[in-house]
């Protein structure tokens, strides 16, 4: 009897230890799956320090050592004129291209300008494998200017058009949008939304009733990033006050060494995002601030392009999650975006239809990994070309007819 009582605490300690080890092992596995297959990594926020990797990026930016991206007082960041990287090359205007473009379209050529984020930019492939280059190979009557910038929100794409692209006299303006654009529309400091990404601030729109009000880039001087490095807390607190995501993001803690604590924080952050109203019923909540700001920006973009005498066409880019969801149950989060475009009577191209038509017999990795593969961009170009031909927009002769 005495022996049983003495051994009982030891058994309890062993049992608790096994349970903790089991929970930590399970949490480690789930964290691996989230990072590998959903690009969700544990990245806590801090108002007192700038992470080492972000600090190095900002030091390079302040020293003028960046090769392809650069700071922009208006946009937050953009592509550097004549910028280069192992895969990318820009011309003297900071457009992704191996060539320069004349101020006005060449004779007998339909000029198309494309604005958007990394899918418009055609990230992860070389310059000659972008969908813009593929589109020009399909139709020699087209000249397609690539204004896409990785990480851009729809707000930044619109502002780049307003400040730079409106002067191109493009016959057609393609406005790229994807479901993630809705998240970016209410973000000010990129790491608050996507920790570990571009450590820069951006402008955003806010709603005053149904009216959009532009909040300009809060870091209007490059020197302000030196202040961020030397005294982070007041700068980050100022940025946090303008950002939708900061209240929902988890911060550093003394127990972060435990994988279970990390998983709990990630889970709480995801649930907080959903409770704040961006999602509803597996799609986007059309009454949320994020959705309303995004659609308001899109409306402003389309209206501005039309007033400038160009034809606006919205291009809806599905990402990997959209394709996977559609393969499972023939639904997509982009459905509410498509519905908005239909109600407004906008011209639009849903690239999901192209992937269904030309890529249904290919594996997911054949079409898209993080961004589209060369085959995926070829399908995008073919889908856009089909739309232009069907709507008599593919050559200047057809375009000029009433």
Image (cartoon, grey):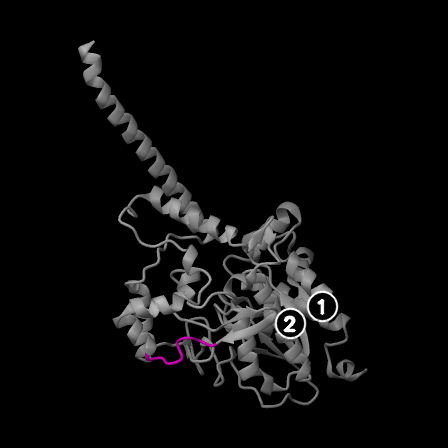
Residue at x-position 32% and y-position 78%: 62
Check if residue 21 falls in the magenta segment: no
Check if residue 220 falls in the magenta segment: yes
Q: Which residue is mark 1?
A: 344
Residue at x-position 41% and y-position 75%: 218
Name the magenta segment's main secondary structure: loop
Q: Residue 397's quadrant in the figure? A: bottom right
Q: Residue 375's quadrant in the figure? A: bottom right
Horizontal side of residue 166 vs 52, given as left or right: right
Q: Residues within 10 Å of mark 2 (few under 14, many from 20)?
A: some
Q: Which segment did they paint magenta? A: 216-223
Q: Which residue is mark 2?
A: 299
Q: Nearer the viewer, residue 218 or 331?
A: 218
Residue at x-position 39% and y-position 44%: 264
Q: Is residue 358 above or below residue 271?
A: below
Q: Quadrant of the N terminus?
A: top left
Query: Extreme front residue here?
Result: 209
- Percent across and percent down for residue 54 are 33, 66
Question: What SS does tag 1 mark?
Answer: helix
Residues marked 1 and 2 touching at CB (< 8 Å): yes
The answer to whether residue 67 is seen in the rendering is yes
- Percent across and percent down for residue 296 are 61, 69
Q: Residues within 10 Å of mark 1 (few under 14, many from 20)?
A: few
């Amino acid at each position: 009897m005495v022996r049983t009582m003495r051994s009982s605490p030891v058994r309890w300690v062993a049992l608790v230890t096994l349970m903790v080890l089991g929970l930590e092992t399970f949490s480690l596995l789930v964290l691996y799956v989230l990072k590998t297959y959903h690009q969700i990594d544990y990245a806590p926020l801090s108002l007192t320090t700038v992470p080492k990797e972000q600090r190095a990026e900002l030091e390079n930016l302040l020293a003028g050592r960046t090769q392809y991206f650069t700071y922009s007082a208006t946009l937050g960041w953009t592509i550097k004129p004549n910028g280069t990287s192992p895969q990318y090359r820009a011309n003297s205007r900071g457009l992704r291209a191996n060539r320069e473009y004349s101020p006005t379209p060449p004779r007998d050529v339909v000029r198309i300008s494309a604005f958007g984020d990394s899918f418009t930019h055609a990230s992860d492939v070389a310059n000659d494998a972008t969908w813009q280059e593929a589109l020009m190979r399909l139709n020699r009557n087209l000249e397609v200017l690539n204004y896409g910038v990785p990480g851009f929100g729809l707000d930044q794409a619109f502002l780049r058009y307003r400040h730079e692209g409106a002067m191109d006299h493009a016959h057609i303006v393609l406005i790229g949008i994807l479901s993630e654009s809705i998240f970016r529309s209410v973000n000010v400091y990129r790491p608050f939304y996507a920790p570990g990404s571009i450590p820069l601030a951006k402008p955003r729109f806010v709603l005053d009733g149904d009216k959009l009000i532009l909040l300009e880039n809060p870091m209007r001087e490059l020197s302000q990033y030196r202040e961020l490095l030397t005294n982070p807390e007041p700068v980050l607190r100022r940025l946090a006050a303008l950002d939708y995501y900061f209240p929902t993001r988890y911060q550093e803690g003394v127990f972060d060494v435990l994988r279970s604590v990390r998983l709990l924080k990630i889970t709480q952050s995801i649930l907080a995002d959903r409770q704040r109203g961006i999602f509803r019923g597996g799609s986007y909540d059309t009454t949320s601030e994020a959705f309303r700001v995004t659609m308001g920006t899109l409306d402003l973009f389309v209206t501005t392009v039309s007033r400038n005498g160009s034809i606006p066409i919205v291009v809806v880019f599905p990402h990997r999650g959209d394709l996977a969801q559609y393969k499972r149950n023939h639904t997509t989060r982009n459905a509410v975006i498509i519905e908005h475009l239909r109600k407004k009577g906008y011209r639009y191209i849903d690239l999901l239809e192209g992937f269904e038509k030309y890529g249904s017999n290919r594996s997911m990795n054949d079409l898209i990994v993080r961004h589209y593969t060369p085959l995926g961009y070829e399908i995008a170009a073919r889908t856009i070309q089909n739309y232009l031909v069907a709507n008599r927009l593919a050559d200047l002769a057809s375009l000029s007819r009433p």
